[in-house]
Image (cartoon, rainbow, N blue to C red):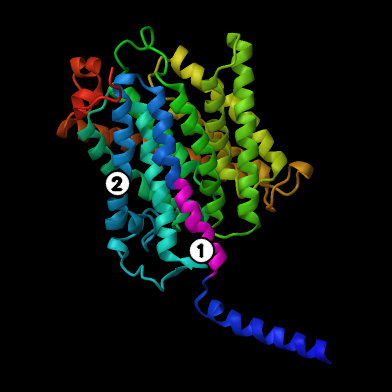
Amino acid sequence: MHQLLAKRLAALFAVVVSVPVAADGLDTGDTAWVMTSTALVLFMTLPGLSLFYAGLVRSRNVLSVLMQCFTIACLVSVLWLVVGYSLAFGDGNFFVGGVGKALFAGVGEDAMSGTIPESSFALFQLTFAIITPALIVGGFAERMRFSAVLLFTTLWLLVVYAPVCHWVWGGGWLSDMGFMDFAGGSVVHITCGTAAIVAAMTMGSRRGFPERMTPPHNMTLTVMGAGMLWVGWFGFNGGSALAANGDAAMAIAVTHISAAAGALVWMFAEWIRFGKPSVLGAVTGMVAGLATITPASGYVGPAGALIIGIAAGVVCFAATNFLKRTLKIDDSLDVFPVHGVGGLVGLILTGLFASNALGVFSGQHDIVIGNQVGIQAIGALATLAYTAVFTWIILKVVDMVVGNRVAEDEETEGLDLTQHEERGYDL
């Protein structure tokens, strides 16, 4: 009798406790996880990507890269508030959102996006909007004017990033097609990679490239930044589930597997081709593995992630060497062959390994592989083409207004002094 009464009281208590949750749709676990992921993804840029890039450039430009990444975070935050979030996620059409959410209109304490506050969703998406143009810095590092970086970032965020984000995650035309991009293979990686190579080709190579280029000045900084990127990527991919659930857990698991596989494959490929494995190769392979698993992370299983990581190491290694050694394009920090090519490969492989009909290599979705691969290819190529065209236009506009490139003597002296009147090191 007492046990029956206890069970009834427990059931009644559960109903009473669940009423306020059901009433407003808020899930505290989901909210806590997305807020944590927001911090992790911001940590990827500040300080992760900043240190990763800073170590790769020459000592006379270390502060310029840190300044560019830091200021992009500040600038994009304001732009996102003013109109960027609205263009990406506001009600609009198949191409871009409207301005109904400008200045976060309607995003109050009670506004919800699924089971989390809309303010939390908007801030999580902001961290993606920050890291994407920050990644592009690697394409024009050591030669773009600081004023040009600011103007380019402003125009690029509004003209390229926000519309593509709307296509995929804001209810646009790719979403309607059934395009699968869990955490940003197209929105982040293809856009930043394409923009970087367009910038590199438009602005031209650094002075002395490739014959007289010195190695990265501080690999210690780069490895520190790489470790931060790896950890932060758990929020990048796991947080994109927008819930503390099995999708988030699996996304983190496959992210880790792909990163490890990419690092090992790149290391061994370099060892075989050049005789020695390098630290730079290992950390670059890790980033390639992370970029390539990003679109697939919420859809594939661990065995599929292993194949994706291996593919990332092989394909991105080959693309990097082909771009620099054969085409001699000075994408300074390898943004296109790592992020652009990685995002493209990841999107295509998503259409394969997301299928639940591959045995141990199965993902979580009942899809027709051929049809889905076709949709993935359309989305990837459309993103690449749109980004390439409008990045080129934006660069031409910026060049007319403030000039893209520093003068030759300023480039020789270094951007730290010529753009900021500071030194990274007291030598």
Magenta: main secondary structure: helix
For the point 52% across and 26% down, the residue is: 284
User: Distance from label 1 to label 2 (Cα)?
Assistant: 24 Å
Q: Amino acid at mark 2?
A: Cys
* Front residue of 396 and 52: 52
Q: Looking at the image, which residue is at 24% across and 39% down?
A: 150
Q: Position of residue 300 (x, y in %)?
A: 66, 46
Which label number is shown at residue 31?
A: 1
Picture coordinates of residue 28 (x, y %)? 54, 68
Q: Is residue 4 left or right of residue 81?
A: right
Nearer the observer, 212 or 43: 43
Q: Secondary structure at mark 1?
A: helix
What residue is disc 2 on?
Answer: 74
Q: Sequence order check: which comes first, mark 1 or mark 2?
A: 1
Which quarter of the picture shows residue 19?
Answer: bottom right
Q: Is residue 93 above or below residue 225?
A: below
Q: Nearer the viewer, residue 175 or 239?
A: 239
Part of the protein shown in magenta: 27-41
Q: Position of residue 264 (x, y in %)?
A: 64, 25
